[in-house]
Structures are given as structure tokens and as C-alpha cells.
Amino acid sequence: MPTKIEKDAVSGTMTTGHEWDGIRELNTPLPKWWLWVFYACIVWSFGYYVFYPSLPGVTGWLGWSQRAELEERMAAEHARVKPMLDRIRATPVAEIARQPELASFAVAGGRAAFADNCAPCHGAGGAGAKGGFPSLADDEWIWGGDLDAIQRTVAFGVRSAHADTRQSQMPRFGLDGLLTPAQISDTAEYVLSLSGRSTVPAAAERGRAVYAEQCVACHGEGGRGNQELGAPSLADRIWLYGGDKAAIERSIQAARGGVMPAWTGRLDEATIRMLTLYVHQLGGGR
């Protein structure tokens, strides 16, 4: 609340006339040297504005702008790499891999494109993440790990809106009433047995019969998987959504299915091929 302006008895400084909860505000001006430096900086900034303009389309008295310099550098870089990119567009991926100079360029470009577009889901270096983001650095591939398979997956995605996308759908055995909760539990126990982790042999044996009737058509005998159908292996310990019994039961009950975007139309053909080669050499290429 406003009060009268007076000299503070303790500090000897005049007050501003403002008071809050009995605390009065002192009127302590900034040092004059600080103010003069501040004013000088304002004047100096106008000089920078004139000689090194910050607005698009204004070149300033020196005839130079940082934007124009960046555009020149980018144009020079595009011109430098254009011959290599043209070769990549005109060369099948398998042939690029057999040409050391071209392959080295493609892998370097793919690494940069991966960091910009793929790492948020698949992680740095393709490590993957629990929750539907597969590792790209091992030997387990849902849709195939050779160059052609990887290129198709990158180009068209998985369950994307593209007409040529990879497409698969696991039934919702629990939500749609195809299996009872007891059958789901037994099947999960059998799936655990495929990687030597079952603790209830009797339940696993009951689950074997359910698996043979409901699951073997896609996941194959012994749970080895089927890359043509996008059915992952169940006989290893690599799991997209978790491999404990509760997670497996959840997958059987409600099904799982992530979506990968189709990069055709978002990235040019050269970038897709470079991504293919980079992913292939991460450690899981076949």
C-alpha cells in the first residue's frame, strides 16, 4: 500500500512510498557507470543492426549477411555431394554395398539421417527400446534383415498408411473371447518353456495344445517365427513388449502392434538407400 516518501532511518536511503506487510521499499538507483554502459550497449546494437542486419532480405552497408553466407555454404555442400547422391540413386542397394567408396559415403549419410529421423524410437545406434521399438543391432528381424527387406521396411513402414506397407495383425485372443483366461495362462507358460523359462510343466503341456491350434500357423513349430508374416520368434529372450509371464499374457489377451511410418515421400530415394545400408551394418544385417 502507498505510504509517504521519506528517508529510511536505518540505511539513510529515501523510500519509494511502497510498503508490503510493514516492509518499505528503498529507492536505490542503479550506479551511474552501469547506466552509461547500458546506454552505450544500446547505441552499439544499432551499429550492429546497420552493418550486420538481422532481418531477411536486408544486406546492410557491408553487403554481407550471415543468412546469405549460410546459403552459399549449403549450396556448395549440395554441389559437392550431388555426384555421389546421383550414383546412389542410380545403383541398387546390393551393388552399393560392393563398392567401398560409395558404401562408405552411404553409411555416413545414413548415420546422419538415422539420428534425425529414427533414433527417437530405435535409440542411438539402433539399440531399440521396450514397448514396440525393435533393436536393429542384433540378428533377430521381424520382417527380414537382408538389404532388400530392410529397404522395403524403411520405404513403406509397418502398419502405416502406405499402400505397400508391411502388415500383420495378431488376434486379440482374450478380448475377443477366443481363449479363456486359463488357456491364456497355459499358453504363456508354454511360450516361456520355448526359451527354457517355464516353472509349471503341467501348465506348459496344456499350453502346447492351445499353441498348436491357435498360434503355430504364424509363429511356427517351436516358436521360431515367420518373417514373411512379421511373426516374431518366441524361442529367444528378445522381446518387444517384455518377456515375463504377465507381459506375454497381455500380448496374447489384447495383441500388440506398433506403427512405423513410411519414409517414402518424406525422404528421397538416396536417403532411404543410405539408411538401409547404415541399418544393415549396425550388427544385425544378413
Image (cartoon, rainbow, N blue to C red):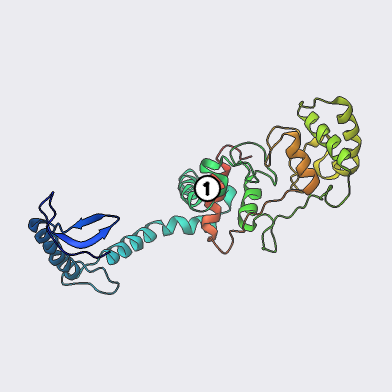
> Disc 1 on helix, strand or loop?
helix
Q: Position of residue 193 (x, y in %)?
A: 80, 29
Residue situated in front as seen by the camera: 6 or 197: 6
Name the amino acid, label 1. Ala
Q: Position of residue 249 (x, y in %)?
A: 78, 40
Density class for disc 1 (Cα within 10 Å; few <14, some 14-19, many ≥20) is: some
Quadrant where the image shows the N terminus: bottom left
Residue 97 in view in this figure: no
Q: Is residue 55 left or right of residue 152?
A: left
Q: Residue at x 11, y 55 (%)?
A: 13
In the rendered image, which quarter is residue 248 located in? top right
In the rendered image, which quarter is residue 126 located in? top right
Q: Position of residue 188 (x, y in %)?
A: 81, 36
In the rendered image, which quarter is residue 264 located in? bottom right
Q: Position of residue 187 (x, y in %)?
A: 84, 37
Q: Is residue 260 left or right of residue 12?
A: right
Residue situated in front as seen by the camera: 178 or 151: 178
Residue situated in front as seen by the camera: 10 or 212: 10
User: In this rendering, is residue 177 above or below 190?
Assistant: below
Q: Is residue 137 left or right of residue 78?
A: right
Q: Is residue 164 left or right of residue 27?
A: right
Q: Across the whole image, how many numbered discs are drawn on residues?
A: 1
Q: Residue at x 24, y 65 (%)?
A: 2
Residue situated in front as seen by the camera: 93 or 124: 124
Q: Residue at x 55, y 55 (%)?
A: 272
- Residue placed under numbered mark 1 in the picture: 119
Residue at the far bottom: name it: 57
User: In this rendering, is residue 244 above or below 171?
Assistant: above
User: In this rendering, is residue 94 above or below 27?
Assistant: above
Quadrant where the image shows the C terminus: top right
